[in-house]
Amino acid sequence: MTDIFIQQVRLIDPSQNRDQRVDIYLSEGKIKDISSQLNIPDHVNIIDGENLILGTGLVDLYSHSGETGHEERETLASLAISAIAGGYTRLTILPDTFPNIDNPAQLSLLRQKCADYPKFSFWGNLTLGGKSEQMTELNELASAGVVGFTDGSGLKNIPLLRRVLEYAQPLNKPVMLKPIDPTLVSNGIMREGSVSLRFGLPGIPEFCETVAINTILELVREFQTPVHLMNISTKRGVELVAQAKSQNLPITASTSWLHLTLNTEDLVNYNTNLRLNPPLGNPWDQLALKEGVKTGVIDAIAVDHTPYTYEEKTVAFGEAPSGAIGLELILPLLWSNLVETGEFSALELWQKLSQDPAICLQQKPPSIVIGETAELVLFDPQKTWVVNQENLHSLSYNTYWFNQEIKGKVIPLFS
């Protein structure tokens, strides 16, 4: 592995609250030295870092894999390459593979398949097949090494969820729940409001989320099982999370990067890549989510990378499956939309993409410390590129920005 010397790069490490310009020397995949100015060693690859950013590796809270079962959408190999291209050094895969990750054998198979790739972790199912009918053997999955438990879907069986939280409490693994009540969604396909009326699309009321949040919080209050609330998408949802945290309930929460970047107004062209679950919020939801992330009410920003083939997404908006890819797009687009606009500092954004997701997963966050493995991302915020099949590493390209030019690109550090 080639030794690398990066001159006068802007170093961002939220674990140390550090944002400063340094020289850094990387040798054999480890951080050899860091200082405001270093002597250049012999026989190293020198990178001019004046216009670049070197940050801790990004940490993915939850994303979907096509493998096993839908390899035409994404394989573990393409997922790993996409993650590296987007600056992600840790991936955490949801259990909705086929078959599901509801038993140690499936977990073992997936681990074998990704043994040569960057750090993969896997969520295990709360219920068999994610069907909310029968609880999995949580203790066996915990012993096998799942990062935590989730079905990644809305609340379907509250009595069973109560039992799950009772059984999970002593296992010391995060339980992740998606606060959506499917029985209230009905035929809705976008967030309810004046925009949904204008576009003529059936609306999904915000209480589909808030009723579910309140249900979860009451169960957490009773059993004190730590829970992560994924995909918070409404202003009222942010308020409920803030209230619960003020009461010291053991919860964390995340929102997806798309809910920070876009809102219902962006559905004007009925782009099926913006058919999401939960749906994009109204403009006031987007503002509340940004404020919630900035203040720490929302702990982390998730990728929720959800690949689908061109054929699956080339249908009417209401018939399209929900989800979009994001691993290669999240950093440049959040940098452009949050940091360059002055809404977030670089350190604040990095904290929500790197340090805090790791904490939610009960992992040690990446840090830039002499002697440690170089879990890093090198980012050029000014480099432009076109989001197309030639430049994307994902097998799928279901994104709102397809064939558009965006600014900001991760630069490979190690070949």
Image (cartoon, rainbow, N blue to C red):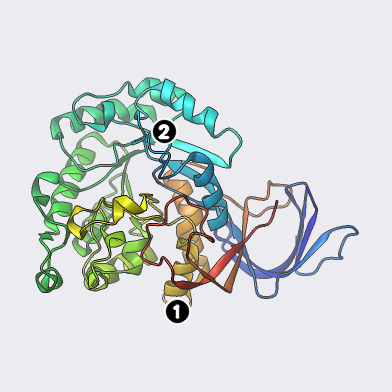
Is 86 displayed left or right of 8 in the figure? Answer: left
Occupied quadrant, residue 403: bottom left
Q: Nearer the viewer, residue 222 or 369?
A: 369
Q: Nearer the viewer, residue 403 or 211?
A: 403
Q: CA distance from mark 2 to mark 1?
A: 42 Å
Q: Nearer the viewer, mark 2 or mark 1?
A: 2
Q: What is the secondary structure assignment of the residue under circle 2?
A: loop
Residue lying farthest to the bottom in this orientation? 341
Residue 247 visible to the viewer: yes
Q: Nearer the viewer, residue 365 or 385?
A: 385
Establish if 382 lies above or below 137: below
Residue lying farthest to the right in this orientation? 42
Occupied quadrant, residue 173: top left
Q: Which residue is mark 1?
A: 342
Amino acid on which the number 1 mark rests in the picture: Gly
Q: Position of residue 278 (x, y in %)?
A: 24, 54
Q: Position of residue 71 (x, y in %)?
A: 43, 39
Rendered image: mark on residue 68? 2
Could you classify mark 2 by the number of other residues whose Cα lies within 10 Å: few (under 14), some (14-19), or many (20 or more)? Answer: some
Residue 292 visible to the viewer: no
In percent of the image, x 49 and y 63: which residue is there? 331
- Earlier sequence position, callout 2 versus callout 1: 2
In percent of the image, x 45 and y 59: which residue is there? 352
Q: Position of residue 80 (x, y in %)?
A: 54, 45
In percent of the image, x 15 and y 44: which residue is there? 215
Q: What is the secondary structure assignment of the residue under circle 1?
A: loop
Establish if 388 lies above or below 396: below
Establish if 172 lies above or below 329: above
